[in-house]
């Protein structure tokens, strides 16, 4: 039975009302960012240009991109392997190892940050991007392992059995049989880890002191201290930080939302 | 202490992972001096750029890698950066327990005593002012011991007034505190905001309260309080009186409406536009008020009660220090000497900022300018031994606590009496650590 | 979760571990080991940052539980649970059940847009809402003045009454998109027959919600509660970007205090003590939620 449009009016009203509150701050920022402080100079993108060069957002962007790409690539790869181990292979000591990894997903980063800082400093790694990349991988693989293992576990064992009978090794089973099916789960994981790494704040605040190595969120936070009175410039900076994750999300949104809701329940 | 076993595992793991080796500095004739400063406002920044360029020109092969940060940014990062092997060679480090004191305690700053002799810095700056940049070697005694920093600029906290508004209403610069109070009332009556203020950032509220406090305190008291000497207390009659004065102004609505939600920069922005008659802050704001506005401004010291000469918050600006582990100590010291040279004084003066070192003899001070006002104010308190202190230097957590209590006071959440109890407690709790 | 996977004849029993090893090692070194060291260092005290430290038993903990600053920060964290968790979940539930059984064309688009705040950096959210709350040019006060309600326009983030809820509302703005997406997809899983059966019994909308929708959404509720409560307890970047704990500590949270004590005041062991306590609280709450929902899930089926 298809409801008539008239019946749906209250539903749409409510949906639009909520949408208004969701989009209001975003729209406000966007319109502020395009406000021209000095008509006739750079045109509509003046604020962005200024944030990019004077505010060094171009530099921060590069750092964020390096960190996020390396972390995402390594974490996702390792999580697939470890998720496969938990989901479809026999692992001795699993009952012990599994909760151990679950712990990493639940505790706050504050719990690890102080020793991490001290150790990184004694190795001379503070103020290098490695100080962001390595801990971020360590944290991401804990979630990634849980995520991939619950997905692999939900796949029928017969798939593995059949492939093994056909002569596939364990390695081949993973890449030739399981991964093609697991593409939605792994792409959701890619998006999630990329976003978390991109938006990570505390680690980047503590480990990096040089301005030239800052990532975008920390750059924005300090930019705010300097240009708090210049709202259009702040808005442009905020949009530069937000745009990559936003685009990634919109690009993958169908798979992402589905994968997220089903994956979250399994985990 | 036993070596941390975890650290060893961590170290091995990081090497096995081949993550990377600590960077090795390649030896070459070219030397790079890494300098962190907090002169981020346009006018100040130009001065430093100019000085750096001239320094490079005088030292072929030396290049200066400058990093400019907002003070808050600098305070958060410089402590960690000075512990790095490739941290800044020269950096501005705020005086006081929480910044310079902590760094000295951890052995991260170089004592500048020898260089001070070599370059005769003590002739350029009065000893009482250099004491503010001094700590004992263990970082416990403040205001004595070795010199750890040299400041290029001087600071004095006073009252900026909008000359255009004053002329329009025929108001004059007050000469006593009572006159000042009358003036505030007059301004309020005509519907202008008397004092532009924003307490969201917190730190400038300390200056405002303490500026009033300085009218009441003695030279000895404020020295003892900041340096934690002679067992003084915060719980005094005059501190309470100063708090009540501040509290009254809030009640009388003398500050910018909704000042609790306005930041320091936004408050200055509005003062610059002529939306208030006065603002109370330090001489560092002066260069900002010279450009980009059609209003003209002047500066005067908060006038004291008639019976005594009033102290004013002030002193040397944030000093340049040298990282203890740098290999370019001599070059760094030479750089600092350049930053406090006569040439530097001249450039600062041109930018409208009061230099810490004496102005060159040939320098002509133009009368009746904002710069002349701030220089006169500084020379007055310096010559008469009336240079007060930033009270948040007193303990490592004093800054935090003062902001905490002031924001409570300004929103009528706490009373002046509770404020006194809170800060006294803070101060007493700190004393034992100092021994 | 049971371990059904089996080894093949002649396969080494270490093979599974081999696949696990790289991830496990990185996790152990860069997350687990540091957590252990945090706990260990909470029993020590040091004169200076890089100097020797001495074992002091529970002295840091005793000091911590008398520290009014810490206790009020912890209290604020719990207040944040209302904004991070309770508000978005109840709103998400309301909306999801309202839209539950009607096919609304264009629903996917709405769902996609609602989720947007969740993908933004918390610093971006902070910058955005600081502007929203600006006393002079912020849209909230501008709107109030436009309505002629000048007396309600105020310094939101500078006010002792409103700063905490104001930051909280920004957090709720972020969190409820996630809750809603979860619930909307969960509700599609509930078999239509259950609703029809209750309709025949003459149950009203509320009873339907209580007896069909809510039990059906238990797995989603458990996930939503867990994620949002953990987020409320570990909040750092949002407060850092919006208020840094001001005014007068009224938006101070534990994460901010840990950062201050560790990296501004250089007392690593005291900060580690706070971090340990916070971690224990988070673990405890997670375990309780897991247990409660496991039981009610069984009961519901």
Image (cartoon, coloured by chain):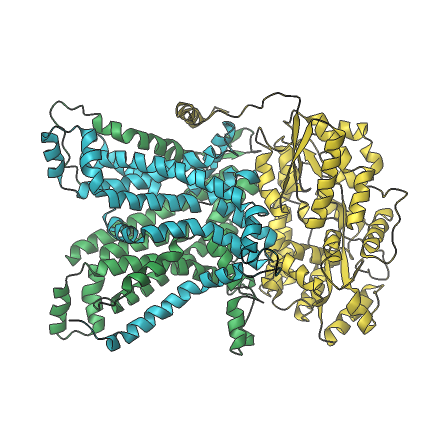
Counting from the top left corner in percent of width and height, residue A135 is at 41, 36
Decide if residue B107 is on the left or right side of residue A136: right
**Corner quadrant of residue B240:** bottom right
- Front residue of this view, candidates C288 and C263: C263
Rendered residue at 72%/32% (across/down): B56
Position of the C terminus of chain C, as image quadrant, is bottom left
Number of numbered discs: 0
Do we see residue C238 in this rendering? no
Counting from the top left corner in percent of width and height, residue A251 is at 34, 51
Do we see residue A68 in this rendering? yes
Rendered residue at 64%/27% (across/down): B326
Decide if residue C301 is on the left or right side of residue B213: left
Residue A122 against residue B234 in the figure, above or below? above
Of the chain colours in the picture, the one used for chain C is green
Counting from the top left corner in percent of width and height, residue B382 is at 84, 47
Decide if residue A61 is on the left or right side of residue A98: right
**Corner quadrant of residue B291:** bottom right
Rendered residue at 14%/72% (across/down): C199
Of the chain colours in the picture, the one used for chain B is yellow
**Corner quadrant of residue B64:** top right
Position of the N terminus of chain C, as image quadrant, is top left
Residue A258 against residue A78 in the figure, above or below? below
Residue B398 against residue A168 in the figure, above or below? below
Of the chain colours in the picture, the one used for chain A is cyan
- Front residue of this view, candidates A125 and A258: A258
Counting from the top left corner in percent of width and height, residue B233 is at 70, 50
- Front residue of this view, candidates C113 and C82: C113
């Amino acid at each position: 039975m298809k409801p008539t449009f008239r019946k749906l009016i209250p539903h749409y009203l409510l949906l639009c009302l909520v949408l208004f509150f969701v989009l209001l701050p975003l729209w406000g920022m966007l319109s502020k960012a395009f406000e021209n402080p000095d008509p006739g100079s750079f045109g509509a993108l003046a604020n962005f240009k200024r944030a990019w060069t004077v505010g060094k957002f171009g530099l921060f962007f590069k750092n964020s991109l390096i960190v996020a790409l390396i972390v995402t690539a390594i974490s996702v790869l390792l999580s697939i392997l470890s998720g496969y181990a938990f989901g479809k292979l026999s692992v001795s000591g699993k009952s012990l190892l599994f909760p151990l990894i679950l712990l990493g997903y639940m505790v706050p980063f504050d719990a690890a940050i102080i020793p991490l800082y001290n150790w990184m400093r004694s190795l001379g790694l503070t103020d290098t991007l490695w100080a962001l990349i390595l801990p971020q991988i360590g944290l991401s693989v804990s979630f990634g392992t849980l995520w991939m293992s619950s997905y692999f576990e939900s796949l029928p064992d017969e798939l593995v059995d059949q492939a093994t009978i056909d002569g596939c090794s364990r390695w081949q089973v993973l890449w030739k049989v399981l991964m093609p099916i697991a593409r939605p789960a792994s792409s959701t994981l890619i998006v999630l880890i990329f976003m978390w790494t991109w938006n990570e704040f505390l680690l980047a605040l503590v480990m990096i002191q040089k301005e030239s190595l800052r990532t975008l969120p920390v750059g924005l936070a300090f930019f705010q201290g300097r240009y708090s009175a210049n709202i259009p410039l702040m808005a442009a900076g905020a949009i530069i930080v937000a745009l990559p994750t936003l685009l990634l999300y919109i690009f993958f949104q169908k798979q992402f939302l589905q994968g997220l809701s089903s994956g979250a329940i399994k985990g | 202490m036993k070596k941390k076993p975890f650290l060893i595992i961590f170290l091995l793991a990081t090497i096995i992972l081949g993550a990377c080796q600590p960077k090795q500095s390649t030896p070459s004739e070219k030397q790079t001096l890494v300098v962190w400063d907090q002169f981020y406002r346009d006018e100040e920044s130009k001065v430093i750029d100019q000085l750096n360029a001239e320094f490079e020109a005088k030292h072929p092969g030396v290049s200066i890698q400058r990093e400019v940060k907002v003070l808050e940014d600098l305070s958060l990062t410089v402590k960690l950066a000075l512990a790095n092997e490739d941290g800044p060679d020269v950096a501005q480090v705020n005086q006081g327990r929480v910044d310079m004191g902590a760094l000295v305690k951890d052995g991260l700053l170089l004592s500048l005593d020898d260089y001070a002799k070599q370059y005769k810095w003590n002739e350029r700056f009065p000893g009482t002012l250099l004491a503010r940049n001094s700590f004992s070697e263990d970082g416990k005694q403040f205001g004595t011991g070795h010199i750890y920093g040299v400041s290029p600029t001087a600071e004095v906290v006073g009252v900026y007034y909008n000359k255009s508004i004053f002329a329009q209403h025929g108001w004059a610069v007050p000469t006593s505190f009572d006159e000042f109070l009358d003036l505030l009332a007059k301004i309020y009556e005509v519907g202008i905001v008397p004092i532009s203020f924003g307490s969201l950032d917190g730190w400038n509220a300390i200056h405002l309260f303490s500026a009033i406090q300085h009218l009441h305190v003695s030279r000895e008291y404020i020295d003892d309080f900041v340096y934690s000497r002679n067992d003084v207390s915060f719980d005094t009659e005059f501190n309470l009186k100063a708090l009540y004065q501040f509290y009254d102004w809030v009640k009388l609505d003398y500050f910018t409406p909704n000042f609790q939600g306005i930041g320091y920069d936004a408050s200055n922005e509005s003062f610059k536009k002529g939306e208030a008659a006065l603002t109370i802050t330090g001489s560092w704001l002066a260069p900002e008020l010279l450009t980009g506005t059609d209003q003209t401004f002047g500066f005067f010291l908060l006038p004291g009660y008639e019976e005594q000469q009033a102290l004013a918050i002030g002193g040397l600006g944030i000093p340049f220090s040298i990282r203890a582990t740098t290999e370019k100590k001599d070059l760094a010291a030479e750089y600092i000497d350049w930053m406090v040279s006569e040439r530097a004084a001249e450039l600062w003066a041109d930018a409208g900022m009061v230099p810490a070192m004496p102005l060159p003899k040939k320098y002509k001070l133009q009368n009746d300018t904002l710069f002349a006002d701030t220089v006169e104010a500084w020379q007055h308190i310096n010559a008469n031994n009336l240079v007060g202190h930033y009270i948040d230097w007193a303990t490592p957590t004093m800054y935090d606590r003062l902001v905490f209590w002031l924001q409570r006071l300004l929103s009528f959440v706490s009373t002046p009496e509770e404020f006194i109890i809170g800060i006294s407690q803070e101060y007493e709790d700190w004393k034992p650590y100092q021994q | 979760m049971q371990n059904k996977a089996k080894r093949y004849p002649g396969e080494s029993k270490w093979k599974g571990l081999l696949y696990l090893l790289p991830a496990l090692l990185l996790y152990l070194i860069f997350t687990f080991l540091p957590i252990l060291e945090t706990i260990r260092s909470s029993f020590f005290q040091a004169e200076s940052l890089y100097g020797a430290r001495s074992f002091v038993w529970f002295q840091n903990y005793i000091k911590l539980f008398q520290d009014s600053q810490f206790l009020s920060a912890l209290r604020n964290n719990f207040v944040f649970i209302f904004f991070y968790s309770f508000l978005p979940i109840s709103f998400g539930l309301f909306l999801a059940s309202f839209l539950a059984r009607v096919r609304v064309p264009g629903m996917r688009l709405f769902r996609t847009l609602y989720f947007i705040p969740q993908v933004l950096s918390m610093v971006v959210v902070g910058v955005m809402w600081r502007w929203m709350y600006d006393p002079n040019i912020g849209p909230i006060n501008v709107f109030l003045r436009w309505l002629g309600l000048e007396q309600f326009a105020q310094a939101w983030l500078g006010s002792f009454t409103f700063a905490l809820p104001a930051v909280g509302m920004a957090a709720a703005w972020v969190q409820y998109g996630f809750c809603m997406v979860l619930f909307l997809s969960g509700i599609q899983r509930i078999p239509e027959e259950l609703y029809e059966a209750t309709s025949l019994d003459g149950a009203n909308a509320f009873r339907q919600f209580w007896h069909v929708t809510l039990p059906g959404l238990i797995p989603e509720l458990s996930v939503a509660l867990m994620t949002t409560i953990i987020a409320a307890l570990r909040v750092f970047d949002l407060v850092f970007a919006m208020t840094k704990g001001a005014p007068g500590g009224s938006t101070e949270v534990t994460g901010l205090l840990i950062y201050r004590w560790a990296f501004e005041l250089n007392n690593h062991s005291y900060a580690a003590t706070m971090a340990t306590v916070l971690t224990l609280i988070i673990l405890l709450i997670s375990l309780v939620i897991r247990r409660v929902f496991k039981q009610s899930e069984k009961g519901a089926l």
